[in-house]
Each structure stands twice: as C-alpha cells, then as structure tokens.
Image (cartoon, rainbow, N blue to C red):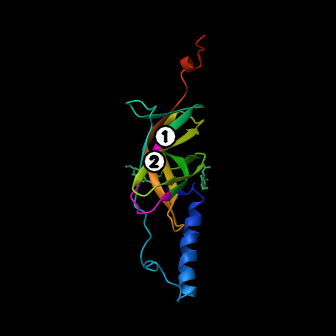
Amino acid sequence: MGKFAFLSLALLSVQALVARAEDAAANPDKPVLDDAANAVPQVNVDVSTTFPDSEVFGVKLVNGLPTTAQVKIANNEPDPITVNIIGGSLWTLSEPSQNVHNLTVSRYGVEIDAKSEKTITYNFVTELLPQDLSLNLATMVAKKDGLIFTMPAYNGTVSVVEPEMSIFDPQV
Ligand SMILES: *[C@@H]1O[C@H](CO)[C@@H](O)[C@H](O)[C@H]1NC(C)=O
Ligand SMILES: *[C@@H]1O[C@H](CO)[C@@H](O)[C@H](O)[C@H]1NC(C)=O
C-alpha cells in the first residue's frame, strides 16, 4: 500500500470509512444500508492504462516532454461513479524498491454512467537520470454514496531517456 502514499487524499477515504462506522455506532437507530461493520466496501470498476505514444519496446519517459497515459475506466456499478484524481509514482527496480519521484496529481471530477466506460487522459512530465524504473499509476473514484476508492491503474517498467536531438531540430 506504500506505493499509493503519493495519493495523500487516500487518507480521506480512510477517514470517510471511519466516520461512517462511527456514525453507525453512535446512531444505532439510523438505518445502515449494508453490513457496513463487517463488509469491506468495494467498487466494481475495471481500470486499464495504455500509452499511445509508446513503442513496441516499452514505455519511455522522455525527459522534459509530456508522457500521455490513457486511463480507461469501466464502471460496472449500477450507479454512476466519479473519477476524482489520477496520480502516480516512480520506484527503483531493485529490492527494496525506493520511491524516486511522485508525479503531479491531476484532478478530474468526471462522472461515468452506470455500466459504461470513459477514457481519461493523464499527462505528466519527468526530469530524471536515464534509468529503468517501475511506474505505478492509480486513480481515486467515488461511488454515489461518497465512499472513495483507490484503484491501481498501471504497474510496469518504464525507461527514462533523454530526448533525441532531432526532436528539437526545427522543421523550417
Ligand atoms: C512521495 O509522496 C509520499 C507521500 O506524500 C512521500 O512520503 C514521499 O517522500 C514522496 N517521494 C518523493 C521522492 O518525494
Ligand atoms: C507491480 O508489479 C510487480 C511485478 O509484477 C510486483 O512485484 C509488484 O508487487 C507490483 N506492485 C504493485 C503496487 O502492484
């Protein structure tokens, strides 16, 4: 779970759960929708990420240039969900894995209807020493009842590279 620490808002979801449980305990007469005290809340959502600019040999993060991630979120819930934020972090491949960098967190507030999907574009820029790293992306989605869930969106090896000079050659 440490890999998702960059999503400091994750604290909010924990707080929301605790508040809800305390609320239920303090107000025993208040109807509790589900077996909240025992059941671990879940959200039925499929998240997958692709990198449209990446080559067959893998995902490259080019220093100083934006990397585009397309995060596809399929909402299998009977109600709409809201995609709040997408963020990520970079880790060394060696064990124990070290947190090298946290990516900028983007806020969205995009609603996805029940039983439908949306693809959200997440852009980030890095300036790091060329090396292979593990990229972790995650998204936080809220259910209709306000409960927030952190969903892994990507976990894979990426290569940090310097831009090729040709990228800066003016085409004039
Ligand atoms: C990434 O974010 C986490 C949580 O906020 C923090 O503990 C960690 O030091 C950050 N990593 C870097 C490399 O700044
Ligand atoms: C990411 O994938 C690696 C290799 O498959 C695995 O060892 C690691 O636990 C995964 N990390 C997360 C946060 O899922």
Q: Main secondary structure of the magenta part?
A: strand
Q: Earlier in the sequence, mark 1 or mark 2?
A: 1
Counting other residues with Cα less than 10 Å from the Cα at mark 2, is it few (<14), some (14-19), or many (20 or more)? some
Q: Quadrant of residue 127?
A: top right
Q: Nearer the viewer, residue 133 or 33?
A: 33
Observer able to see residue 73: no
Is residue 158 positioned above or below 78 on the image? above
Query: How far across and how far down the image is residue 133, in percent?
Result: 48, 41
Residue drawn at the location 44% of the way across and 34% of the way down: 52
Query: How far across and how far down the image is residue 89, in percent?
Result: 54, 48
Is residue 48 positioned above or below 41 on the image? above
Query: How far across and how far down the image is residue 147, in percent?
Result: 52, 67
Residue drawn at the location 59% of the way across and 19% of the way down: 168
Name the residue carrying label 1: 69
Q: Which mark is residue 118?
A: 2
- The kind of secondary structure element at disc 2 is strand
Measured in 3D between alpha carbons, the distance from the residue under mark 1 to the one under mark 2, in whole angstroms, is: 13 Å
Q: Magenta stretch containing residue 66, yes or no?
A: no
At label 2, the amino acid type is Lys
Q: Magenta stretch containing residue 79, yes or no?
A: yes
At label 1, the amino acid type is Ala
Is residue 20 positioned above or below 62 on the image? below
Question: What's the magenta region?
Answer: 69-81
Observer able to see residue 38: yes
Counting other residues with Cα less than 10 Å from the Cα at mark 1, is it few (<14), some (14-19), or many (20 or more)? many
